[in-house]
Amino acid sequence: MHILIVRFSSMGDVVLQTATVNWLRSLYGASLRLSFVTSKEFVSLLERHPGINHVFSFDRRGGDKWSDLIKKIDGLEEEHPIDLIIDMHATMRSFRLKMNFWTTPALTVDKRRWERFLLTKFKGAFFKRLISEKVFGLEPQVERIINDFQDMFHDHHGVRATKDYVHGPHGEMTSLGLLEEYKIEGEYLVLAPSASFSPKRWPVKNFVELAKKLLEISSYKIVILAGADDNFCEAFNGISSDRLLNLQGKTSLKESMSILSRAKICIGNDSGMNHIAEAHGVSCLTLFGPTDPRFGFAPHGCSSRYLSKELWCKPCSTTGSKPCFRDKLYCMEEITVSEVVKAYESMGVQA
């Protein structure tokens, strides 16, 4: 059997789809041929995954032609005909791709858009308690997708079988391939203070204070990971310690993945960095602001934790991109450094 999975973006969402890859591998083993279509910037996430045979890239911003992507897939299909397309994106782009292969059976993920819309419109804590948790897909997205599809594959042990298949130390269901080691002497924690949208970022001053506290209460080094444009991370340069390593803008995605894979823990916002860490079996502490764990993107490892405040105005959007209408971002600023430290200590990684 040859299955083509489609998920163009974003970074965290692409990583989360590896749970479905692992589930399919647990069903079909080596007899399955699995291809994946994604945006060019996320190819490095998947190209070393042991369960994926081929990764197709598409660089829309770089001027790639849609026809070229279709020709690449056609070329592979001549040798290995595609038996099924699984659309994990459910957008016009993925619909267009399915139309190019309209004779091939396809499954499309239910992204719970209606449920997320309801939760965003009716924010009150009372309403959240009144309606069953299952309505809002409180279970992790990685389990939800498998649960949605497993009957179609005549499988009734999808989640359990996937966890057994991965054999991870923290109950994670996602996985990524190992990369060359990025050499950092000694054991370390990772702080990931960035996020795709600024409202999703815990204040950098809090991250700086947290770094100072972690340097006091543990013997670990602290590594800062962020992108080239995340100049707010210069605030960490005010910490005078040889145990703090600020790598903001200094690592490629592959190098960041390698660093995350060897960390003791990753503390960050609701972003792709935490999903990458969990996919390497690293426990995460995720800080949720304007988004809501009920959307299904809470960490899924048994040793991972998250912090999220119940506020009448939250969630304000499904992606966290909407600017706050108040003069203070309460959903983020009410998460205190002491709460994060306490949650960190509860994870049993102190040294």
Image: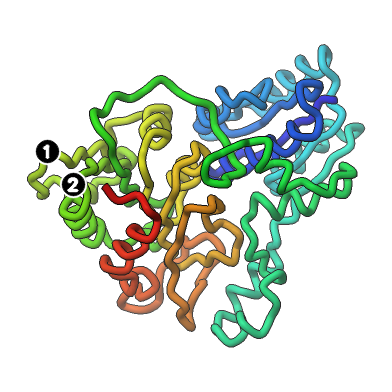
What residue is drawn where x is 39% and y is 37%?
A: 260
Is tag 1's residue or tag 2's residue first in the polypeptide sequence?
2
Which quadrant is home to the N terminus? top right
Badge 2 element = helix
| Left or right for 275, reference 121 | left
Q: Is residue 39 visible?
A: yes
Q: Which mark is residue 242?
A: 1
Tags 1 and 2 touching, CB below 8 Å: no
Badge 1 element = loop
Q: Quadrant of residue 118?
A: bottom right
Give the Cα distance between marks 1 and 2. Answer: 16 Å
- Front in this rendered view, residue 179 or 45: 179
Q: Residue furthest bottom?
A: 126
For the residue carrying disc 1, how many other residues have a C-alpha within 10 Å: few (<14), some (14-19), or many (20+)? few
- Front in this rendered view, residue 130 or 228: 130
What residue is drawn where x is 65% and y is 39%?
A: 7
Q: Amino acid at mark 1?
A: Asp
What residue is drawn where x is 84% and y is 40%?
A: 106
Measured as percent of width and height from the top left, residue 249 is found at 28, 36
Measured as percent of width and height from the top left, residue 47 is found at 57, 23
Measured as percent of width and height from the top left, residue 122 is found at 60, 81
Q: Which mark is residue 122?
A: none
Q: Amino acid at mark 2?
A: Glu
What residue is drawn where x is 45% and y is 51%?
A: 271
Q: Quadrant of residue 183?
A: top left
For the residue carrying disc 2, how many other residues have a C-alpha within 10 Å: few (<14), some (14-19), or many (20+)? few
In the image, residue 213 sits, relative to residue 124, either above or below, namely above
| Left or right for 124, reference 196 | right
According to the picture, the residue beneath numbered tag 2 turns out to be: 234
| Left or right for 89, reference 154 | left
